[in-house]
Amino acid sequence: MASTNHANAVSSSSQQFTSLLGCTMESIIHELLYSRSIYPPDSYVHHRHLGVRFHCSRVPQVCDYISNFLKVAVPSIVSGVGDSISLVILEEEVANSNQSGTSGGQQQRIGATKTLERFVFQFQIDNIIYGEDTKPKHIALHNDGGNMLPMDIQHEAMKRDTELASEAKTQMERSMRDCLLQVLSLRGRRRSKDEKAENLSFKLCLHVAEEDMKQQQDDNDIVVASVSGKQCPELVTAVNQGEWFQPEESSCLFSTNANGNANGSKGLIRPIRHVNLPSCGIKMQMGFAVPSEQN
């Protein structure tokens, strides 16, 4: 019974960790969309997360897209299958219909987009406090002879683990709050002279860890992605049901470098905030990507 209670406590802590990370990422993405002027200012309302007031889109399609993405992306990150999330700001390319080449003609969309900005959230997750290990980590349940230790020792071990989990949660909340505050302090994006708001859009990308990435088929011919033996059921289901697709990697990158040359580069990552919480088993770097040759 003691082991079962401890397993339930660890499972609850893991769910709290995933929920906290997901809510923070959702808040950050909404605030970034506001600061990048993707939609009119009056299409946002104020919400609070961890005591911080931020802007949240009130357009249902935008909210659903972000929420549905994170329902898959965050479990992928926590499980170790995914290692980064990107917010890509796009501009639809247009051509002037005036055949003379002079300005003043109507602009027509040509069905292509270019990347204006990229915000990248890189993660490294280890199972420490919020891991899947269901045994107390500081006092083993069995002695060397294989016999169960007395209940009072087991209870003390579980109590200690609960205290550590509570402390880790507090540290995690503080770090996530600082990340949101950092986003609020970012300077808004400067628009180019010819840029129009109606041509701007965004997309969210999940990057799957490349190390030992495999694709297998189970008995029902369902494609299953695994990384170093880890799997994420939410991602598998989303891909199998056609809710997610794997685009060309270049579509999530810069199509040109700072000199205007096509290179499909990831760009240089300028750090915005770095989180390192060994007690929670998480490292996160939030960065702003710029074309590779831009200074």
Image: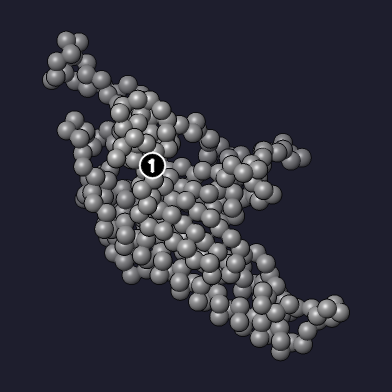
**Residue 140 in the image, given as x and y percentages of width and height:** 73, 77
Instruction: From the image, tell me which residue sits under label 1.
Output: 268
Residue type, mark 1 in image? Leu
Residue at 34% of width from left, 35% of height from top?
293
The one nearer the camera, 190 or 144, is 144
Residue at far bottom of view: 152
Q: Quadrant of residue 262?
A: top left
Q: Quadrant of residue 294?
A: top left
| Label 1 residue SS | strand
Note whether residue 201 is visible: no
Residue at 70% of width from left, 79% of height from top?
139
> How many callouts does the rendering have?
1
The one nearer the camera, 45 or 162, is 162
Residue at 31% of width from left, 66% of height from top?
52
Mark 1 crowd level (few <14, some 14–19, many ≥20, 10 Å Cα): some
Q: How is the image coloured?
A: one colour
**14 left or right of 221?**
left
**Residue 100 in the image, given as x and y percentages of width and height:** 16, 10
Quarter of the figure that contains the N terminus: bottom right
Note whether residue 284 is visible: yes
Residue at 65% of width from left, 43% of height from top?
212
**Residue 9 in the image, given as x and y percentages of width and height:** 61, 74
Residue at far top of view: 100
Whether residue 121 is situated above or below residue 240 in the rendered picture:
below
Quarter of the figure that contains the C terminus: top left
Whether residue 144 is situated above or below residue 109 in the rendered picture:
below
**Residue 168 in the image, given as x and y percentages of width and height:** 51, 72
**98 left or right of 27?**
left
